Image (spheres, helix red, strand yellow):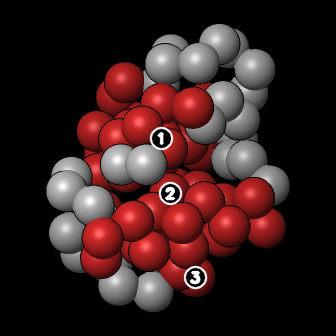
Amino acid sequence: MRSKELLNKYDPFHLGEGNYDTEMSAILNLLTIHDAAAPLAAAMADVFEESFGESPDRQELETLAAKLLACEDSCAL
């Protein structure tokens, strides 16, 4: 699965799949900066905090970050 597909399926605030275009674009950009799950998850939390005034569960974000980084090594963005 590609990074973009993983992000499109992610629905932390139950708004419906694919309703986070701005946040997902920002996260795809973060993938070019971060190469470890914890810092990527922290940056992702900041993106959601800025947009929604809250961030998803940190463990959930770290799991997603690890999957995204693994995909980055084997998938095209």
Using the image as rendered, state which of residue 19 and residue 73 is in the foreground: 73
| Residue that carries the numbered disc 2 in the rendered image | 44
Residue at point 45%, 86% (across, down)? 36
Is 55 placed above or below 67 here?
above
Label 1: element kind: helix
* Among the two numbered marks 3 and 2 on one chain, the one whose residue lies closer to the N terminus: 3
Expressed as whole percent of the image width and height from the top left, the position of residue 6 reads: 49, 44
| Residue that carries the numbered disc 3 in the rendered image | 38
Using the image as rendered, state which of residue 50 and residue 77 is in the foreground: 77
Label 3: element kind: helix
- Toward the bottom, the furthest residue is 36
The answer to whether residue 42 shows anywhere in this view is no
The image quarter containing residue 64 is bottom right
Amino acid carrying mark 1 in the image: Leu
- Around disc 2, counting alpha carbons within 10 Å, would you say few (fewer than 14), some (14 to 19), or many (20 or more)? many
Asked if marks 1 and 3 touch (Cβ < 8 Å), the reply is no
| Residue that carries the numbered disc 1 in the rendered image | 7
How far is mark 1 from mark 3, CA to CA?
Answer: 17 Å
How far is mark 1 from mark 2, CA to CA?
Answer: 11 Å
Is 48 placed above or below 69 here?
above
* Among the two numbered marks 1 and 2 on one chain, the one whose residue lies closer to the N terminus: 1
Q: Which mark is residue 58?
A: none
Expressed as whole percent of the image width and height from the top left, the position of residue 62 reads: 65, 70
How far is mark 3 from mark 2, CA to CA?
Answer: 10 Å
Residue at point 50%, 16% (across, down)? 19
Is 5 placed above or below 70 here?
above
